[in-house]
Amino acid sequence: MDTSFAPSLALFTDLYELTMAQAYWQAGRTELATFSLFFRSYPPDRAFFVSAGLTDVLDYLENLQFSAADLAYLRSLRRFDHGFLDYLASLRFTGSVRAMPEGTIAFANEPLLEVTAPIIEGQIAETYLVNQVNLQTTLATKAARVVHAARGKTVVDFAARRTHGVEAADKLARLGYLVGFAGTSNVAAGARYGIPVSGTMAHSFVTSFPSELEAFRQFARSFPDTCTLLVDSYDTLQGVRHAIIVAQELRQAGHRLQGLRLDSGDLLSLSRQARALLDDARLHDVQIFASGGLDEYGVDDLLRGGAPIDGFGVGTKVGVSADAPWTDCVYKLVEYAGQPVLKLSTGKQTLPGRKQVFRRRTADGQFERDVIACDDEPPPTNAEAMLVDVMVGGKRIRPVESLTELRRRFQSESAALPKIFHALRSPPKYEVAVSERLQALQQRTSAAAAARELSAPHEQHPR
């Protein structure tokens, strides 16, 4: 095995995508096809999704190309026709994409994007597209719930060490900022995406010194105006008292202690006691920052309890979306050669044909009702089309949006989603209807498929 071989992203595909592609090619089935990507259902306690991953999807499609080394590897498998591999050598994505822009709120069964391309191009892209949209939408939705739970208080991403890999850590940092986090501890993500970076200290710093107070003083000397002290290495309240000593020394020198961090124990009780000690010392401007196994549920419980906490560091549970680590994200063929198609599998029946999602709002701009419709239907009264053209002929047709623009979009979307759907536990389901025309198309396509398959002649097995 050549250890220097670095597969391109074109090889990030399931084997069956390539075996199907060869069978399509040999059968001469290379007509235009449309695939819809959507979430079949919500994970527990979810009533919406935050659409994410489109930037990476479009980058991938614009650059899709099998390298010579990729093809040599496929040839070594001894599974593929040489003519088919020659075809893959010149394969590029030439299709179009319609999608909900990143940061848009979406709901179950609505296509977040539809790809229309020669069927082999659309089929090979499936694995990467589902991977990216599934991961990033899951993380963005989890992070958005934390922002809602924090009620306007600062949230910082601390998850890099325990996400499922480097890519997931970087994506979470970006998506957290997109939905309202103040920053990230991940320095690489800060550099890559222009996100503010933030951090305090670890217990190892404190325990490496002869005493906690000496550790605090040294850190304050290094960072006299941006210093947040971790106070729970030994005894939390004694740590707060040591932090107060350092804060008073900084004040005398013309600086100020920014904050202290609580990372373990009863955070509600400790935050109250810490705030009282700080206020007694007239250190009202020193903030209390909390971390340690928090996600939206922990943040919500603390603030419901009246915890005087100014900001939260969220890590493991958010970085892996611990309560909902997977979603039923799928990518299904809905049209081939101009004809609608569907699957009739029990519990997994799909809607045929190219589609559009229309969203109606109330007079004050709140989401009221969505309708999944055929793509060429006129919009209902006071409704907007959610899927927009983002790629034609294999090339982007819109400029790449900045993270700041995406952040603004999500803020607007979140504000327009009625509060009941933000509920962290057992939220109601937002109304998503299927248009009469699409229902009729589904019925006709289902009936035709059932009649065709049931009436197909049965081959006689040789005796």
Image (cartoon, helix red, strand yellow):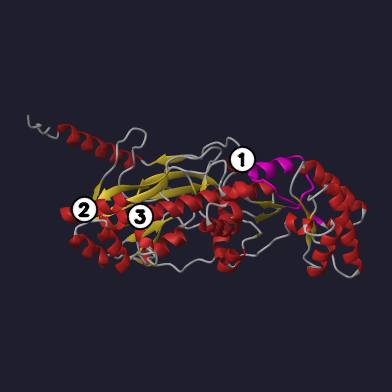
Mark 3–mark 2 Cα distance, whole angstroms, equals: 16 Å
Q: Is residue 357 left or right of residue 312?
A: left
Q: Is label 2 or label 1 in front?
A: 2
Between residues 411 and 434, which one lies in front from this camera angle? 411
Q: Is residue 371 above or below residue 57?
A: above
Q: In terms of secondary structure, where does tag 1 sit? A: loop
| Residue placed under numbered mark 2 in the picture | 24
- What's the amino acid at mark 2? Tyr
Q: Is label 1 or label 3 in front?
A: 3
The single residue placed furthest to the left in the displayed view is 463
Q: Which mark is residue 115?
A: none
- Over which residues does the magenta segment extend? 287-311
For the residues bearing labels 3 and 2, Cβ distance under 8 angstroms: no
Ranked by sequence position, the earlier of labels 2 and 1 is 2
- What's the amino acid at mark 3? Thr
- Quadrant location of residue 125? bottom left
The single residue placed furthest to the top in the displayed view is 463
| Residue placed under numbered mark 3 in the picture | 13
- What's the amino acid at mark 1? Leu
Q: In terms of secondary structure, where does tag 2 sit? A: helix
Mark 1–mark 3 Cα distance, whole angstroms, equals: 35 Å
Q: Is residue 440 magenta?
A: no
Task: Name the residue: 85% across, 52% down.
Answer: 240
- Measured as percent of width and height from the top left, residue 335 is found at 27, 49
Q: Is residue 234 left or right of residue 342?
A: right
The quadrant of the picture occupied by the N terminus is bottom left
Mark 2–mark 1 Cα distance, whole angstroms, equals: 46 Å
